[in-house]
Image (cartoon, helix red, strand yellow):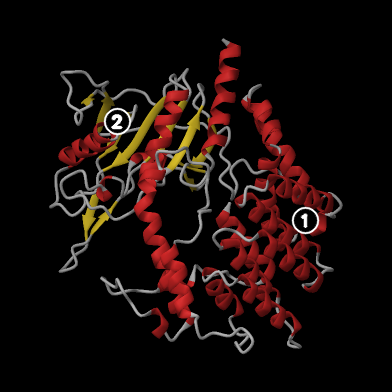
Amino acid sequence: MQKCLRIVWAAVFGVVIPGSVYGQTLFNSPDTFPNYSAYQYIDECVAAAARITSEADAKSSVWRDTLPLEDRERMSDVPVNAIRAAQACLVRVSVDTLSLDNTHIWASALLMAQRDHDVEKLYRRFFDSPVRRSPEEFVKMLNVYRTSRPIRLEGVERLYQFALANVSPDSVVRQVAFRLIKADMARKARNKEMKNALLREVLSITDTLSDSVKSSDAYRLVGLFLYESVRDFTEQEGLDSLSISLSAYQSYLGGIWSRVMVGPFPHNMFMNNPVGLEVPPLEGDFWYRSVKATQSVSAVERYRKIEPYSRPVKGKINLIAFLQGGCHASSFMIRGGRNNGNMSCWRIFSAIHRMKNVFPDLEVTVVSKTYGSVGDAPPVGPSEEADTLAKYFLGYHRLPATLVVSKTEFFRLAGLDQRRIDSKTANESNYTLNNISYATPGSILLVDEAGRIVSQWNINRDEESTIRRIIAAVFSRLARER
């Protein structure tokens, strides 16, 4: 949804919102006690505060993973050290004399320094300027409030009202886009009442639009995001239909599509909606199954090799998790691993444990592949690497799952280069459905008893509570039919 929202901004307002300015800033390590007040450029100030915040998040993220993941955009306050760094950077800055170029970058730094009042003064100067301002400048300023920690909804409200009055108010598409952006901010701030009110307002506008307007390129990108928002808005209706049948659920999704878009409901569209597609059996060269710990089984070796068999399992509700790439390589628990601060895999592991505890009949399959080495260790053979994967997924993390590992075919570039170029595995090819790959790292598929996809997520992105409700609806329907 976040990727789509950025595309909405780019299409409607003619601007691509760049990644955070500090994302491209390099630091020499260690840089423990820099003199922030000596920094000459605003992006250095933003980068310094952001780096401190990022490091603080990385150090605590492992422990936060023991809690249910609820798509928490980092809502905590900025660390004290980051605030002090931003304040030191801006100690000589007066908003009364600041250039109005790159206003949004100055505003971002001022918010980090907790100078909210100065941000409003800066924006007031900006709006009072006789220079005509473009729509993209307003969107960048909205984005400053949207990405602040914590989110300043009051600032969003004031800026939003001005933007609607000043940025092509005759453009219905832009009005819809602004409301959707604000609804997304309200979602992140856990303001459900505001979010739902904005979505009702948007639907009241789009219900009156002609097919010609809905067929425009600008509206179609806005409409894709609106489709996802309405799905969230009418979630209970969707769960009720899913508890009846998969076809009823597909009709529910199609009804939303026909309300906000024009043309036939694509079976597999840009928003990754593969509902109803039948998946092929998984293939693999090495198969393992988790083993419950006993006095004769060590804490590490909670797995055993097994013969291949048909998965996903027909007649059962299946969860397939594609976890190849980076998970075991970033672990400090195994030889050659490295703790690089990437804890996304840990979040997925924790979520799988919780869902298996709630739904013990859920068949979980972890799908991975070989890369030729593990972390910074010397290259190993496919069998040894597969054993390492089993030790990591089923041993250290005790995932209650069957692990399927594919031996990756590859070739090396000629000459001195000698880089390894991997070929697609059978699972990567077979799970590319309607030209969209559902075997990318972190992709999670829920498959029903007939082998059809019910939903697809990335647990690192989507709300775990929503995933659980969808699984519960499928199990409810299966229990009633039996």
As shown in the figure, which amino acid type bears the numbered disc 2? Arg
Please give the label number shown on residue 398.
2
Q: Which structural element holds mark 1?
A: helix
Give the CA separation, mark 1 to mark 2: 50 Å
Residue at point 51%, 37% (across, down): 464
User: Depth check: 133 or 141 in front?
Assistant: 141
Q: Could you tell me residue 171's position as x and y percent?
A: 81, 67
The disc label shown at residue 214, or none: 1
Image vertical order of residue 98 relative to residue 332, above or below: below
Q: Residue at x 23, y 26 (%)?
A: 303
Question: Tag 2's secondary structure?
Answer: loop
> In the displayed structure, would residue 274 be above or below residue 461?
above
Q: Earlier in the sequence, mark 1 or mark 2?
A: 1
What residue sits 42% from the left and 82% below the top? 37
Q: Is residue 126 left or right of residue 401?
A: right
Other residues around mark 1 within 10 Å, as few (<14) / some (14–19) / many (≥20): many
Residue 467 at what x, y percent from top left? 54, 34
Check the picture and name the quadrant holding the C terminus: top right
